Every structure is written in C-alpha cells, then in structure tokens.
C-alpha cells in the first residue's frame, strides 16, 4: 500500500497493484497437522508478511468460524484483541482459538471488517481461509466454504511438497472468476505466538514487486511452490461486494497453504 502509484482509477487491475508488495490477512498458527485433541491458538493479523513490513489495524471481524465435516463452528467468542508489533510499526490484531475434537479437516475462516486504505482511498476486505487437520484424515478440504468469494484448493492445503505445484480455483458466489489477479506471498517471518512480534525473517521478496498469477477462463491458476513454509494467495477484488460506505471496496479471497520439504 505504501508506494502506491495511481489509485482506484487505473484502467486495469494489473497496473493497479504492481507497485508494492501485498497486504495479506493472516490466520496463523505454527503447525497445521495435529494428532491429538487440543486447543489450537490462532492469530489474526493484517500484514505484509513477505517483506516483514507494515502491519495494519484490524477492526472487529464480521465473522470468524471453522467448518468441520460441513458443520460450522463459531469462533467469535475466542477473540481477544492484541497488538502486533511489526518491524516498523504496530497495529491492532486478534488472538483466537479452536478446539480440535474429531479427526478431519478444519477450514478456519475470517471475514474481517473492511479496512480503509487511505493512500488508495479504498476499503479492503480479505476473506481468508486457513486449513488445519487432525489425524491425517481428509474430510472436506476440497469443498467450498460457501463464502462470498474464496479460493478452492485442488491440492490438499495441509501438506503441499516444496517443489510441487498448487492449483486453486477462484470463486465468487460459487461461480468461477476468469482473469482474476492473484498475488502470491511467502510468510518470510512467522509471528512469535507469545511475544506478538515477527520471528526473524528467513527470506525476502525478489525484485520486481508482487508475485502474480492470473486465473484462466474457468477460474483456475497454478503456482510452483519453491520453498517449505506458508504460502498465501490473494485474489484481488474477486468478491461480489464492490462498495463500502460510498467508497470502492476490494473484496479479496485469501487462502493459506503449508508446504514441507521432503527429508
Ligand atoms: Cu499493503
């Protein structure tokens, strides 16, 4: 958002976001694969995790829940405000938690309050999914969560192999979105769960601005995963709601996946 060049009236979406590295809504916990029943802490942070950069204030989320075997588990009661201290600034964020009871996939969803980005004079709302699994049993990671906009994974998002590929399908109100611009980020610095600061960054963005993929005519995109860790994909403006409080709204779909190295 800093160094933003042109604002909302640039003719194409491609130009509109080429300037800076991307903002990403996080739903973060260090591990995604679990064996035992346990309470898993989650952090909601609106950040620039690839460049370990600017962190933005979150308002109270509109919704925070998980889906397990088609059933919705409301997580709003678990939210506690925290302050996340980035390398250059600090901002309002949230701690949350989910109890994993039964085996299977847990799709964790946050629908944040729209964030006003003054430098672009627009609102941004990144509806975000992250995946946890208990017991190694797949139970619905491949199902849409029924969100206004979302990225449907075609590879199991809890154990992607570094060096393989990830394919997703961009949906808006359940229908494929052709030509969506998808920003790709690596979580170069992972949050310290106790201190609410970034851990040391393991890498940094390559030159040339955001890493970008485009969805094809059926909404699909693929990306080769070069490195173990967390990768985020954000389809910009793919959602059905285009305006908030009289200003342009970029309603984005974000998905986080976890990649591993083979030993
Ligand atoms: Cu930004």
Image: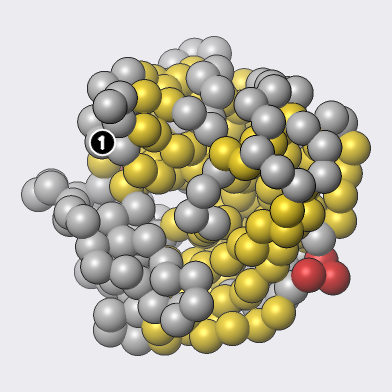
- Direction right: furthest residue: 71
On the picture, is 52 further left or further right than 57?
left
Image location (x, y in percent) of residue 227: 26, 36
Q: Is residue 123 above or below residue 238?
A: below
Q: Is residue 108 above or below residue 142?
A: below
- Direction top: furthest residue: 218
SS class, disc 1: loop
Q: Where is residue 262, by image quadrant?
A: top left
Image location (x, y in percent) of residue 15: 28, 46
Q: Which one is nearer the viewer's eye here, 136 or 132?
A: 136
Quadrant of the snapshot with the C terminus: top left
Q: Which one is nearer the viewer's eye here, 162 or 151?
A: 162
Q: Residue at x 86, y 31 (%)?
A: 70
Task: Quickly name the residue at label 1.
Answer: 227
Can residue 239 be seen in this snapshot? no
On the picture, is 243 further left or further right than 208?
right
Image location (x, y in percent) of residue 221: 43, 21
Q: Residue at x 51, y 19 (%)?
A: 155
């Amino acid at each position: 958002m800093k160094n933003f060049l042109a604002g909302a009236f640039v003719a194409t979406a491609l130009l509109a976001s080429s300037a800076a590295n991307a903002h990403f809504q996080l739903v973060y916990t260090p591990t995604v694969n679990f064996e035992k029943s346990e309470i898993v802490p989650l952090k909601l942070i609106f950040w620039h995790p690839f460049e370990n950069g600017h962190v933005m204030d979150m308002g109270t989320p509109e919704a925070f829940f998980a889906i397990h075997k088609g059933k919705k588990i409301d997580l709003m009661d678990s939210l506690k405000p925290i302050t996340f201290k980035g390398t250059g600034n600090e901002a309002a964020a949230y701690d949350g938690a989910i109890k994993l009871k039964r085996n299977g996939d847990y799709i964790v969803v946050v629908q944040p309050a729209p964030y006003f980005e003054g430098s672009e004079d627009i609102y941004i709302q990144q509806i975000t999914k992250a995946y946890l699994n208990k017991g190694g049993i797949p139970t619905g990671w491949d199902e849409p969560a029924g969100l206004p906009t979302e990225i449907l994974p075609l590879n199991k998002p809890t154990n992607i192999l570094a060096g393989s590929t990830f394919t997703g399908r961009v949906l808006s109100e359940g229908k494929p979105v052709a030509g969506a611009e998808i920003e790709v980020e690596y979580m170069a610095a992972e949050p310290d769960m106790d201190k609410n600061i970034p851990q040391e960054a393991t890498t940094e963005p390559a030159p040339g601005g955001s890493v970008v993929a485009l969805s094809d005519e059926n909404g699909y995109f693929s990306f080769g995963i070069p490195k173990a860790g967390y990768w985020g994909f954000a389809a910009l403006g793919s959602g059905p709601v285009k305006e908030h409080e009289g200003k342009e709204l970029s309603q984005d779909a974000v998905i986080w996946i976890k990649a591993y190295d083979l030993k």
